Image (cartoon, helix red, strand yellow):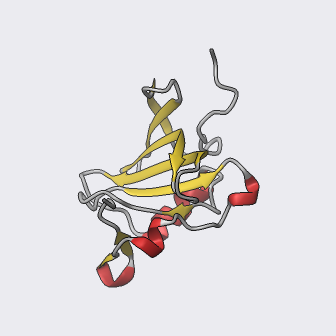
Amino acid sequence: MENILKPKRPNKNSGWQLVGETKDQFGYDKYFYTHPNGFVVISALEVADGIVRNEAIPQYHVSISKHPAIRCSSKDAKFILKQFGMSDALEDNHSPSRIIRSFWLPVDENKIGIDCHCVENEPAVILDKGDYIWRPAGK
């Protein structure tokens, strides 16, 4: 069965090259992009628990990193999110690698802008003078 909803794609002529695609274990598409400026993006549609605990909802998920294995700045991330039509996405990082920046945008427009419940319940690790925040996975 083919999903009607697809991950976000970048604007045309924005320099992004689709370098691969796959499906996750639930059959949702994931697209892999690279940019001449060294950025790498994974764009996916995922059903994720987060905004309201125990309420799994479909969300667009864009993960951004930069080659060679460094984290992009908030300024770069904001620019990239705009290219993917995700300017309203919220950043929510749970990766101890600290290289990937993860952004989430609910498909349901009524839930856009609502922080994940983890923001209040999990300690924040603040790096680079506040430019990057991540939270260890809750128990």
Residue at the (37%, 82%) spot, across then down: 130
Residue at the (57%, 59%) spot, across then down: 51
- Quadrant of the drawing holding the C terminus: bottom left
Residue 14 visible here: no
40 lies above or below 125: above
Q: In front: 47, or 17?
A: 47
Residue at the (60%, 40%) spot, across then down: 9
65 lies above or below 16: below
Residue at the (48%, 36%) spot, across then down: 17
**Residue 16: percent from the left, percent from the top?**
51, 42
Residue 121 in which image quadrant: bottom left
Q: In front: 49, or 54?
A: 54
50 lies above or below 4: below
Residue 8 visible here: yes
Q: Could you tell whether 29 is left or right of 11 in the image?
A: left
Q: Could you tell whether 9 is left or right of 27 in the image?
A: right
**Residue 108: percent from the left, percent from the top?**
72, 50
Residue 88 in which image quadrant: bottom right
Q: Could you tell whether 102 is left or right of 97 in the image?
A: right
Q: In front: 120, or 10?
A: 120
- Quadrant of the drawing holding the N terminus: top right
Q: Could you tell whether 57 is left or right of 137 in the image?
A: right
Q: Residue furthest bottom?
A: 129
